Amino acid sequence: MSLHPVALYCTAILGGLLFLLGLAVSIQRFRSKVGSGPAPEKHALLNRLIRAHANTAEFAPFLAVLFLFFGWQGPSALALGLIVGATVCRCLLVIGLLAWPSLSRPNPARFVGALGTYLSGAALCLVMVAGL
């Protein structure tokens, strides 16, 4: 059995997000002349990029494992929906961290992205155990 294309593309999106954010952090460090650590200004773009990259690095690897597990198993419609939902939520979270000027105040994209990541990730784990 081959890998389901939805699982493949969603895994690729997570990987692309992780590596592009890493590149963006490096570029912004060069531009702002901050070699390591955060920028002095709390809400600087560099700090928002660092947070978006770190948060993606926290969740994307395990989500990718789940996506690939289901992708090789011939995923159910439920699993495919959760895979797509988790991917959309990860992208929303990054948008919520970068498009708003402050990390201190919540915004709708960040809230939906975070909550959706938690719920879809937990649901994928349950679906895996339940064999659905």
Image (tube, grey):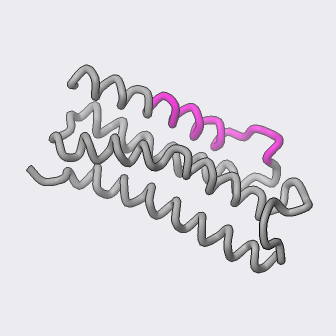
Q: Is 73 located above or below residue 97 in the figure?
A: above
Location of residue 107 with respect to 27 vertically, above or below = above
Q: Residue at x 23, y 34 (%)?
A: 77
Q: Main secondary structure of the magenta part?
A: helix
Question: Which residue occupies the extreme top position in the image?
Answer: 130
- Magenta residue check for 43: no
Q: Is residue 112 magenta?
A: yes
Residue 13 figure quarter:
bottom left
Q: Position of residue 38 (x, y in %)?
A: 81, 60
**Does residue 94 appear left or right of residue 64 in this picture?**
right
Q: Is residue 84 left or right of residue 107?
A: left
Q: Examine the image and state in which quarter residue 46 appears.
A: bottom right
Task: Give the extent of the magenta segment.
Answer: 103-120
Q: Nearer the viewer, residue 53 or 111?
A: 53
Give the image location of residue 109, x and y in percent: 63, 43
Image location of residue 39, percent across then percent down = 85, 63
